[in-house]
Image (cartoon, grey):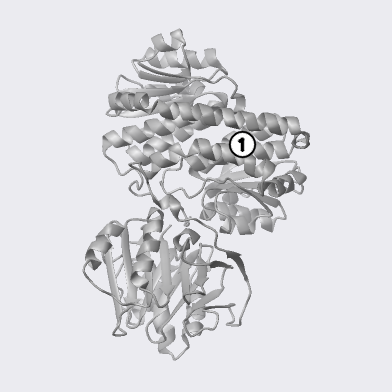
Amino acid sequence: MCGIVGHIGPKDSVNIVLEGLRRLEYRGYDSAGVSFIDESDELQIYKKSGKLDNLKGLLEGKDFKARMCIGHTRWATHGEVNDTNSHPHMKDHISIVHNGIIENASALRKELAAGGYEFQSQTDSEVFLSLLTRELATGKSFKQAMLDSFSLVEGNSAFVVLNKDVFEIMSIKKGAPLVCGINTVDSEAFVSSDPYALAGMASRLYFPADNVLCHLSAKNKNLINFYDSEGNPTENYMSKKQDMSVGPTDKGEFEHFMLKEIHEQPELIRSLTQFYFHGEGLESLLKAGEFVPSKFHMTACGTAYYAGLLIRDFLEAYNRIPCSPELASEFRYRKPLLQEGESGLFISQSGETADTLAAQELCTENNIKTLSIVNVDGSTLFRNCDNNLLIRAGMEIGVASTKAFTQQVLTGRLLSLALSKEMNEEASRVKLTAKFSLLAEKIDHLISRSEEIKNIAESIYNHKGFFYTGRGIYFPVALEGALKLKEIAYVHAEGYAAGELKHGPIAMIDEDMVNVALVGPELFEKTVSNIQEIKARKGVILTIGPKDHEELAELSDYYFGIDFDGLEELSPIYINIVNQLLAYYIAKYKGTDIDKPRNLAKSVTVE
């Protein structure tokens, strides 16, 4: 969940690393730090709790001529948020940054402390620093000390280490994201926890497998060398040309990335069918449709899980394939029944979510075919699955996911088509393309009505709690709508199947509780009946439902009417855009940090 960037080259390494960290700050923003070798060949370290701007303030006015630097933005796991616990950690001529968790840190810390090591921080990361300095003290080479130290730690982690004595950077990982890159024109080498940090910098990327040691050195002919756990040269990595754009880091005319990303959705929707029906995505879509499993084991976390609930509805309704959606964090611990002929379906924005990766690994171990719906080409999930469908959302900077949710659901609808005989019928592809285009058009119109949603948000943002309710296909977006509000506005919000309120939660209803009622054409009368139950108990009603409906308008304290005509199974995506805008404006009135909510990080790479 932390952001890591390292650089070796003739340019100003500190500024290059800071730029990379700026792009990755959404991965963690509790603190930030850099460590580098200065023009006097001294190892320097600067770190500060809080956002990256705090670190930049610490460095302001200093002119460093570093040609080697590592940096880190932190999402805290072990140890409170303060300057001392910030990364990098340094001992003598060594500095390290770390992403992940050392599961046996407590036992190792006791052993190392008994041997005389004095810990400066509360972090598990410093345990690896201590192990490394101990191994180096025995006369081992930097490479051997890295391998031997890494063999002693348990859990999923990535370490990047700068060694002043040999002017080298080494990195190694297990179950955590890590990517290396080179720019041969300028003789630069990079390492990062996210390929996006290297966009426009590295011309080629390398994704090492677990337990592969990456050696960055200006003395290397290839700038980067790779070694296996025995210290032998290895080609156990995937290599690809860097084709990412750096553009999405610019908010443009928008106040927040989240708002920009909401506005990007119509065009992304329009381009998705072009990619899969007429572009490079056709091959992967046809390949995904070749194997029709007897059952899908569908796993994901958070917003991606709610997208999976809608994808389940597509696959069961149109393909009659049973689906078992499960939270990835629970999947492998309940010993699921995995049988021949079934398939694992994994949904993720980053492709680096630790729980989802663990679920995928379990399926692979049981010889179950695996398929991902993922945003990041080349991510760990993408590399590990048998087949992949890219959601084509582009870089999503806002921590609270918006456009990725929409693209995940729509990619799931394309998968449903691919698994049916209709995929071979041009008329079916044309019909679905038209429906996607209609959805994009209607979302454009919704966005043009943002001022109406903003006014509603202004009227309700100070209420004590929010119940999002929906029935049938609208239940998953009730869950997602409540999650968005919790994430960015820090208010109590719950999503419920509307018919379940009377089985307990209705006890919470009073005049300071808002019911955000999601009402579609389906199960209309039953949903209205559930709203009546809340109204009778003096709950505040905000209805998002069919336009120009007199009964809904009279029943509601606030009514936002929308046009569902022609959308059918895509209607939940449409109504969810209102949820996204409502959460955004409530958070804005609350004065919270919308793009970087407290305690959250974009990519959860720890269990």
Q: Dot 1 lies on which element?
A: helix
User: Circle 1: is it few (<14), some (14-19), or many (20+) Cα within 10 Å?
Assistant: many
Which residue is drawn at the image coordinates 38% and 28% (left, top)? 450
Where on the picture, by quarter, is residue 68? Answer: bottom left
Image quadrant in which you'd find residue 256: top left
Q: Quadrant of residue 523?
A: top right
Q: Residue sitting at 38 percent across and 44 percent down?
A: 257
Q: Position of residue 413 (x, y in %)?
A: 64, 36
- Residue toward you, 348 or 429: 429
| Quadrant of the rendering where the N terminus is positioned | bottom left
Q: Position of residue 189 (x, y in %)?
A: 48, 74
Q: Residue at x 42, y 75 (%)?
A: 161
User: Would residue 26 appear left or right of 520 to someone viewing this image?
Assistant: left
Query: Looking at the picture, which amino acid does disc 1 mark?
Result: Ile
Asked if residue 235 shows in the view, the reply is yes
Q: Position of residue 311 (x, y in %)?
A: 61, 36
Can you name the residue that lies furthest to the front here?
Answer: 185
Residue displayed at 53% across by 20% down: 520
Disc 1 marks which residue? 311
Q: Residue furthest bottom?
A: 139
Residue 58 appears at what percent x and percent y? 23, 65
Q: Is 146 placed left or right of 379 in the picture?
A: left
